[in-house]
Image (cartoon, helix red, strand yellow):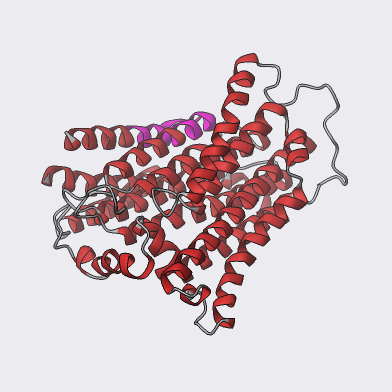
Amino acid sequence: MNILGIYYYWVFAILLMIGFYVVIAKLNLIKKLIGLSLFQAAVFLLYITMGNVEGASAPIYGFGAETFSNPLPQVLILTAIVVGISTTALGLGIVVRIKEEYDSVEEHEIQEMDRR
Amino acid sequence: MTVVFGIFLLTLLLITAVAIVRTKNLFVAVMLMGIASLLIAANFFLLDAADVALTEAAVGAGISTVLFLGTLALTTERERAPTSRKILSFAVVSAAALVVIYATFDKPRFGSPDAPTQTHVAPWYLDKTREFIDIPNVVTAVLGSFRGYDTLGEVFVVFAAGIGVLFLLAGAPGGGKRPAPPGSDVGLSRHLIPRVVGRLLIPFILLFGLYVQFHGEYGPGGGFQAGAIVAAAIVLYALLEGEEKALQVIPRRVLLGLSAGGAILYGGVGVAGMLLGGNFLDYSVLADDPVKGQQTGILLIEAGVGLTVTGVLLSIFHAFAARGRQA
């Protein structure tokens, strides 16, 4: 079980950093938002991993289970997912407006136009 | 067996993430993002988080993909720019990754019942849910009652984000809204198989959404999931029959009313508790029996959450779709 535990944490770390890399290294604004979603997903994964209890079941009574996983991280992440999509939609809305004004979604082109 | 399955899913997830970084085609990246969401949802399910898995599958793989595709239709499908400062970014990211991986060695063992996360408030929630609220799903109890303030805040954030998108996109760039010419190729209505399968599926998706909404106290489910599922059903309808038809079913004004009404219903339940002599969002005073009151309160606020999430997600979808028609 321990191998899986370490692996879960490492996947979290690598996924987090892949998202981070996309946000800082890619110049396309849509790609940046995709990277931000990956970053977010990694954080979700960490929370749910930490809430898991060995041999336990989902925190719902009445199915014969005795021990339960931690319900609190699940509640936090459940709401965070829906808030995440709302903020992503706001970001996409801004990207669409930028495209209409500058006719580009590439960061370096937009900055060049601003300098002129 | 779980170990093998978990490692398999996580490895697939990493491969997908690397592919997302490497592809220059944004359409491919968005599709891969949908696959990544589905893999994460399966992982959540393995980790005993059924409620979260349901939300991630509906939101991440469904609604999010549709919104990204809508944006691609309005902007571009290809990434033109070269990666900037590749070596510097890679060095920064690698250094940060090493720090995070170093930190994982100090983490408590995976699944350990003695980890600090497991011994703080969680046992109290698991223990007292039966006594105070008496519903089987502890996640719903914590979400709706014990941490009702949090959830109220989240609902307002969702509402605010929806209003923000409408401010950005609802104003037409060139004046009034042009309706699509009649008889033009709207949606997928010319394609036989999606139309037949979609029409068959939509009623069942809606029914499932209602089940998830009202069964949230007994099994995995609740307002957030149900809102996303119902919105997904209507988005599917709009994709099949054209956006105009979907707007005839639920007009924009109704969607706005749903978004605001849900938030007001949630806040109103809180204020009703105050008027009846309790604290804000204290449901115990809503009925003669405190436990009954808690259950009534959770049912009402979950309905509010569901209404707001449906309204906001559909408003956002229509804002993107209408923008595409004007362009």
Q: Residue B147 at what x, y percent from top left?
A: 42, 69
On-image quarter of the C terminus of chain B? top right
Q: Is residue A14 visible?
A: yes
Q: Which residue is located at x 59 percent, y 24 percent?
A: B200
Q: Relative to the observer, which residue lies in front, B47 or B157?
A: B47
Q: Which residue is located at x 38 percent, y 66 percent?
A: B133
Q: Relative to the observer, which residue lies in front, A40 or B142?
A: B142
Q: Which residue is located at x 23 percent, y 64 percent?
A: B117
The outermost residue toward the front is B288
Q: Is residue B241 left or right of residue B180?
A: left
Q: Which residues are magenta?
A: B15-33
Query: Residue A28 appears in which quarter of the rendering?
Result: top right
Q: Is residue B49 left or right of residue B34?
A: left
Q: Is residue A98 visible?
A: no
Q: Residue B8 at what x, y percent from top left?
A: 24, 32
Query: Residue A7 appears in which quarter of the rendering?
Result: top left
Majority secondary structure of magenta residues? helix
In the image, residue B198 sits, relative to residue B215, either above or below, namely above
Check if residue A88 falls in the magenta segment: no
In the image, residue B164 sits, relative to residue B239, either above or below, namely below
Q: Relative to the observer, which residue lies in front, B94 or B277?
A: B277
Q: Residue B75 at what x, y percent from top left?
A: 65, 37
